[in-house]
Image (cartoon, rainbow, N blue to C red):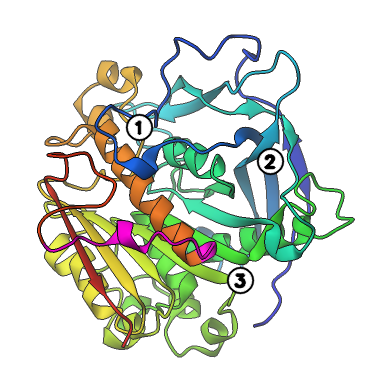
Amino acid sequence: MKAVAVVLAVTVMGSFAPSLGAQPVAGLEYYGDARPDAPELAARGSLQVGVRTQVVEHAGQADILRAAAGSPEARYTRRLTLEIWYPASLAPGQNEHTVYTDVLGSGPGNPARPNTPFQFNGRAARDARPVPPPGTAPSSAYPLVIVSHGYPGSRLQMSYLTENLTSKGYVVIAIDHAESTRADKAGFPSTLLNRPLDDLFVLQTAAAWAKAGSGHFLAGMVDASRTALVGYSMGGYGALNAAGAGISEAAVAFVPGGSLAVHRQGDPRYEARRDPRIKAVVAIAPWGGANKLWDAAGLAGLRTPTLFIGGDQDDIAGYEDGVLRLFEGAVHADRTLLTYRGARHNTAPNPPPPAAAAAGLEDFMAYAEPAWDSRRINNINQHFVTAFLGTTLKAQPLQAYLATDGAGLWKGFPKRTAVGLELRHLPAQ
């Protein structure tokens, strides 16, 4: 694998909201808290969680939007805001509490759905002291999980999952993909080109931070050789492509000028950037299957264990011709498919914030599922992602949680609660 340029500039940022670190945790509601009917592995882990926000810059990247406007050689620096969750030790008087700030809307310049800030509670201590992993061997460091949002979305879109995984011994980095968030949404070609490249750049960056003597707070904390990519919608597309599912020749034509050829199966640039440190993929409602981004050869290029999650009524990514087709076509990957019966596309995000209900139907439906309680989906996702990453990144004996016994009994689910779901597994050929 060819080396990729690592960070050129780094800026540390504080909280986006006034500090509420002295406020007690008791009595507050947090996304991801377990409902009484939550499956077993949804429970929060034993580690306390810290969080920091950081900006990294990826210089010299192809500016596909300016290229479409007549500047084919245009280059620019992509500024990526990252939210980093890590096992932490809290100072006296400090609590696992922060306030995240995100925005509603469909991008800048849309008067019908303007960008409107909103805040919500997080169960993590802002800038808390990192807790070193147990032991001294590199393999004892915490595995890395990189999280990629939908289009448009944000790095905070799945905080119920990022905080939960961190409490179980992972370092989790969620990306604000430039030109693809609700705050800065721009042309779709940027998302098609940059999602896999952003994922790989953040992996390289985290690996550099993890080295002894790097001066970064994650030095000695992260084992980047055990990395998982978690992607929702367009994030799922990016994760699958980054892990080995090269797009088809026909898909390259989606963007004039051939810029997407760097993601095409068989292209030397694509083949050279395969990263063996990616040991697992979680693709939630991944986009592209129904749009024929992948042919059989491209899907066969995926060899990384993959957990697919989707709704069988998905009208954005598709199900029969979308998520299910990707699951069945990735013949060289050991893969599992969790299906929410009756669900559409929103099987990944936090529940709708109160501000979304006040903003109107479209902003509310950017988060909500018509036939499911989002909190229930969140708990189920926590359960299955915990089992999947535990088996693939930590060699934990959790395989039984990823199967049924044939009689409709699902390990870890309270009696009478494993309904509305379907679980399938196919081994690698």
Query: Residue at position x 10%, y 46% from top?
Result: 342
Query: In what element is the residue under mark 3?
Result: loop
Query: In what element is the residue under mark 2?
Result: strand
- Residue receiving disc 1: 110
- Residue receiving disc 3: 73
Q: How many C-alpha atoms fall within 10 Å of the one at disc 3: few (<14), some, or many (≥20)? A: few
Query: Residue at position x 61%, y 32% from top?
Result: 48
Residue 228's place in the image compared with 119, above or below, is: below
Left or right position of 107 against 52: left
Find the magenta span and give its range. Answer: 393-406
- Residue receiving disc 2: 54
Indicate the amino acid at tag 1.
Asn
Q: Are marks 2 and 1 in contact (CB under 8 Å)?
A: no
Query: Residue at position x 54%, y 70% from top?
Result: 278
Front position in the image: 379 or 370: 379
* Magenta stretch prevailing secondary structure: loop
Q: How far separated are the C-alphas under marks 3 and 2?
A: 29 Å
Query: Residue at position x 26%, y 40% from top?
Result: 377
Is residue 258 in view?
no
Q: Position of residue 79 (x, y in %)?
A: 64, 48
Query: In what element is the residue under mark 1?
Result: loop
